[in-house]
Amino acid sequence: MAAASSSDYDVCGAESSEANSKWLDAHYDPMANIHTFSACLALADVHGDGEYKLVVGDLGPGGQQPRLKVLKGPLVMTESPLPALPAAAATFLMEQHEPRTPALALASGPCVYVYKNLRPYFKFSLPQLPPNPLEQDLWNQAKEDRIDPLTLKEMLESIRETAEEPLSVQSLRFLQLELSEMEAFVNQHKSNSIKRQTVITTMTTLKKNLADEDAVSCLVLGTENKELLVLDPEAFTILAKMSLPSVPVFLEVSGQFDVEFRLAAACRNGNIYILRRDSKHPKYCIELSAQPVGLIRVHKVLVVGSTQDSLHGFTHKGKKLWTVQMPAAILTMNLLEQHSRGLQAVMAGLANGEVRIYRDKALLNVIHTPDAVTSLCFGRYGREDNTLIMTTRGGGLIIKILKRTAVFVEGGSEVGPPPAQAMKLNVPRKTRLYVDQTLREREAGTAMHRAFQTDLYLLRLRAARAYLQALESSLSPVSATAREPLKLHAVVQGLGPTFKLTLHLQNTSTARPVLGLLVCCLYNEALYSLPRAFFKVPLLVPGLNYPLETFVESLSNKGISDIIKVLVLREGQSAPLLSAHVNMPGSEGLAAA
């Protein structure tokens, strides 16, 4: 085991010693031979003895078999082989009975392997998908020797290029064979039924009916066939199934399944889809400008890392809150949650060997490591509450413990005003005109204020007089009388020379209808012709909009336009109740002719 050699840096980039660092270097082993990513790391008390272990789904690089490793402290406690590459690991409580020992779920291929006390407990397999009918027909013909292997290969390649559904594993293996091996493969597998199986791409947990930390949780699976499945924690039956436009790669959930929950899924098409309870399809969509490399929920904010070397913050409705540019490519992301101080932050492992910790867009801390970090996990490990576990690109293992006295401060370790506050502004020199104006305002300040107040009162008086005149002459499109509360709105449609004039008349009273109204149009007869310029208005029911239509024909061929006055009157009265001035557009039809 090598000595701890990773160093911690503050935001300003200056090297800090062990005494003033926020982290204690607990362990560093560059030859640990652990190759994984953040989704395959989990911390849990798998034996119920209060000693938290590290569960690792190891990818097994270099042709090695994938393995499930359990670490206690710096040492590997147990190892077991896996049939396929792991996709995600999660710990959850299956039942309320004592002892409350969490179960371990490991997604690998089309199955979820559930362990209790690190012993195999249950295996859940995804339901099989219906095969492609054309593919099924081709294998049936091969079974009856009505098609030769070469023609079968050509037809399967054609289906693979055109069909939306992928081929079965049997057909894909057949397409990879040489010509000499095809006949033997067909004879061996032609009697087998075609099976199409999807695989799990991502997995997380969702509380069942309580928000407590030790409450029962459901498993949420994302599959290659663009679906999300919610599993019952006891019977492992499918409680809910949701469809997505693309394959999910990252999942974040909040809430409880039996009450209300939100589910965010980052997909391969570069979009993030938000789903809620009882919704079979996404409710909101967040379109990213690049592919996502991580998705973390911090309180009510979704933090997304992208391949454009940046972090973005979004609300659950898709509104973008902030963006932070990174100095290098983001390799992995995870959540840092310090329960004792109520802190939630985002950890981002970068390609330049840095691990940056952000709260929203504020940088809290930077950790420098000897190699680029490919997976991160923070939580209780052993009997320490705040432990950071990192694995590197070369297979190394780094364990750091957050000091109990450490406090993360936005903007780095320096407390006080921002540096920009100490910068002097480039204030221009005072000119002679500015000085004279300042002296004038100082000497005649009272007179200037009185003049301003006089002008303001005159403006208010003129506005009130104009408003009163409009009400008395019924020039307003809204009636001012309480007996006939009306509202008039006019719309002109058409290019000319014939226009359609629609008058929308509405009774704005709450319960009393209006009857006995007339509408009259006043216009220049030399410019316009109206076949219907005067008509009666039917009974106006409160709250309804009544459209009254008529046609206006332009008589001028010079493109001249004028105003048409629309008056609403009551029978037996000469004063209009309200009026509207319609600015007629120029006739484009006559102008073109």
Image: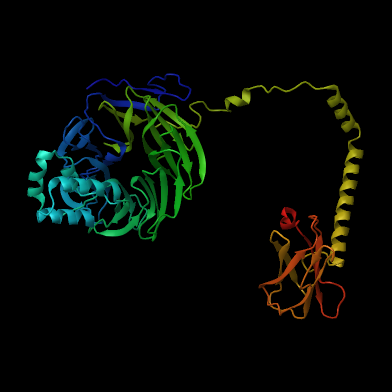
For this view, does 69 lie left or right of residue 13? left
Q: Is residue 413 left or right of residue 499?
A: left
Query: Residue 515 appears at what percent x and percent y?
Result: 75, 80
- Tell me residue 246's x, y (percent): 36, 48
Left or right of 408 in this view: 195: left
Q: Nearer the viewer, residue 250 or 302?
A: 250
Q: Reply above or below: 274 against 518.
A: above
Residue 431 position within the rendered picture, expressed as x and y whole percent measured from the top left: 82, 22
Q: Which quarter of the image is occupied by the C terminus?
A: bottom right
Residue 577 lies in what quarter of the image? bottom right
Q: Position of residue 391 (x, y in %)?
A: 29, 30
Residue 127 visible in this rendered orientation of the protein: no
Q: Is residue 538 above or below residue 492?
A: below
- Residue ID at (26%, 34%): 36
**Residue at x 75%, y 66% (from the top left corner):** 552
Q: Is residue 460 visible?
A: yes
Rendered image coloring scheme: rainbow
